[in-house]
């Protein structure tokens, strides 16, 4: 069996290799697992990564608590490996980063509209999996991220039931700030950084997390994600600022608050607070304006499959990303047409997708290649991809996410309340 380490890494002149891979896959590219550690977090052990490989990057780098999907975005980790966060295309006995493949073929992979506007695949998704909660933090807006040469990061969450057989230590997420909270109160929390728990969670509200539901979160909104394993379509950036200084007894250094802020502003509490979207944080209707539940694309249950929107809605009037969950009954087959390119991960079962096998693994070694992740080009998505569940006993379930403005027909927030089938 091939492993990542047995593949030859190609760094340039990859056009022919990728074109052959697309032909062999029926317009699809096989992707290798892309593991990312976080030094300040505690892995939740639901990524199917073998337990002995949780610290494969080294104990000093922290445990692996994330797997990134169809990513052309580097992970913003200290002491990172050169390709950390970047997905690889598996092409025969070779591998090439998805970023390099897209750079080479451009519109031939992501489509003309995305290529002409962004010159890259501007989004990515991940599984985010921790034993407990993480610090109350936010991701900068594009305006604020530009101050340090970065891009902002809106994001979304979906809690796949297949990866949440246990909720771990704290399946609740704090979002925003209680209505009526003042900037002076938050400023005092920051001023108390070195005096023990700065008390920021006293100003916030936690929501119980439910497998099979999700949230849409814009930039500048404080959130302290809980301990459900989370599928996260998001913008292709890794900026953040941690506003909480102590989590489960673990110190959060000031450097993680200001890492994506101008150096001359690192001690300016008023500036640090100004990077928050204040109105969104103190919104009295926060859940109403951010909560998601799946809503079917169409009434196809009698045909043996259901395709559902799991991420939808706009952030400040713009559609940054969307995502769908496709479920096929045992033995079912269907052809799905989409408007644009997408990254796909299999979360249950086995089957086929055009010419590629799909198989959800039970356990994955760090260097092992799998058959659960795929990238689909825009041309192939529009022509239609044929999915088949080859199992006779369990559903085939896949999650796929799309880039900006690809699905104008996607429902608006709150659509789940009106499901008719």
Image (cartoon, rainbow, N blue to C red):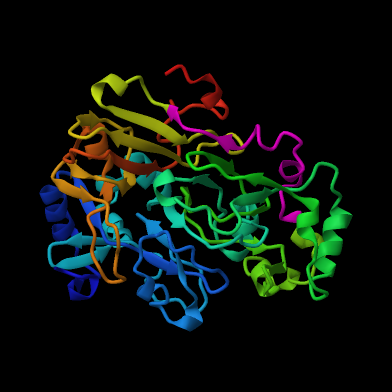
Residue 332 horizontal/vertical position (percent): 20, 31
Quadrant housing residue 259: bottom right
User: Which image quadrant: the N terminus?
Assistant: bottom left
Left or right: residue 297 versus residue 193 is left
Up-down relation of residue 6 to residue 222 (above or below):
below
The front one of 176 and 348 is 348
Quadrant location of the C terminus in the rendered image:
top left
Could you tell me what secondary structure mostly forms the magenta stretch? loop
- What residue appears at the point 36 percent right and 75 percent down from the top-left corner? 52
Q: Vertically, is 394 above or below 188?
A: above
**Residue 72 in view here:** no
Query: Which quarter of the picture shows residue 26?
Result: top left
The answer to if 109 sits in the magenta stretch is no
Query: Is residue 291 or residue 168 the one in the foreground?
Result: 168
Q: Position of residue 31 (x, y in %)?
A: 26, 57
Residue 145 screen position, x and y as percent = 61, 58
Residue 118 x, y percent position in the rendering: 42, 49
Instruction: Determine if residue 316 is in view.
Output: yes
293 falls in the magenta region: yes
Using the rendered view, name the quadrant where residue 226 is placed.
bottom right
Residue that appears at 53% across and 25% down: 415
In the drawing, does residue 253 fall left or right of residue 190?
left
Q: Residue at x 84, y 68 (%)?
A: 191
Which is more toward the observer, 292 or 28?
A: 292
Q: Which residues are magenta?
A: 274-295
Choose between 334 and 208: the one closer to the eye. Answer: 208
| Residue 255 drawn above or below residue 306 | below
Residue drawn at the location 27% of the way across and 19% of the way down: 302
């Amino acid at each position: 069996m091939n492993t990542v380490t047995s593949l030859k890494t190609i760094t340039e002149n990859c056009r022919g290799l990728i074109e052959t891979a697309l032909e062999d896959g029926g317009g699809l590219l096989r992707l290798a697992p892309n593991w990312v550690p976080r030094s300040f977090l505690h892995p939740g052990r639901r990524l199917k990564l073998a337990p002995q490989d949780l610290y494969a990057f080294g104990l000093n780098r922290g445990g692996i608590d994330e797997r990134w999907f169809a990513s052309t975005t580097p992970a913003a980790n200290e002491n990172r490996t050169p390709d950390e966060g970047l997905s690889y295309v598996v092409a025969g006995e070779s591998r090439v980063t998805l970023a390099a493949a897209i750079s080479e073929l451009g519109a031939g992979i992501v489509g003309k509209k995305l290529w002409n506007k962004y010159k890259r695949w501007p989004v990515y998704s991940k599984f985010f999996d921790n034993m407990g909660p993480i610090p109350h933090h936010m991701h900068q807006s594009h305006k604020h991220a530009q101050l340090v040469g970065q891009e902002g990061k809106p994001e979304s969450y979906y809690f796949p039931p297949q990866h949440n057989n246990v909720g771990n230590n704290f399946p609740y997420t704090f979002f925003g700030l209680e209505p009526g909270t003042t900037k002076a109160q938050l400023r005092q929390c920051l001023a108390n950084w070195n005096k023990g728990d700065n008390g920021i969670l006293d100003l916030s509200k936690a929501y119980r997390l439910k497998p099979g539901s999700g949230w849409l979160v814009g930039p500048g909104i404080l959130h302290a994600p809980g301990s459900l394993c989370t599928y996260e379509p998001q913008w292709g950036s890794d900026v953040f600022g941690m506003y909480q200084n102590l989590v489960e007894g673990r110190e959060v250094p000031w450097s993680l608050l200001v890492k994506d802020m101008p150096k001359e502003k690192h001690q300016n509490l008023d500036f640090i607070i100004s990077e928050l979207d204040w109105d969104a944080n103190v919104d009295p209707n926060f859940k109403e304006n951010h909560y998601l539940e799946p809503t079917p694309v169409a009434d196809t249950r009698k045909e043996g499959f259901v395709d559902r929107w799991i991420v939808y809605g706009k952030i400040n009037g713009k559609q940054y990303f969307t995502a769908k969950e496709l479920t096929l009954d045992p033995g079912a087959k269907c052809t799905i047409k989409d408007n644009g390119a997408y990254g796909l991960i299999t979360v249950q079962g086995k089957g086929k997708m055009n010419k590629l096998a799909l198989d959800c693994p039970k356990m994955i070694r760090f260097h092992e290649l799998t058959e659960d992740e795929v990238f689909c080009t825009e041309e192939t998505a529009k022509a239609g991809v044929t999915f088949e569940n080859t199992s006779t006993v369990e559903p085939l379930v896949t999650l796929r996410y799309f880039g900006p403005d690809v699905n104008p027909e996607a429902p608006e927030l709150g659509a789940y309340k009106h499901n008719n089938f």
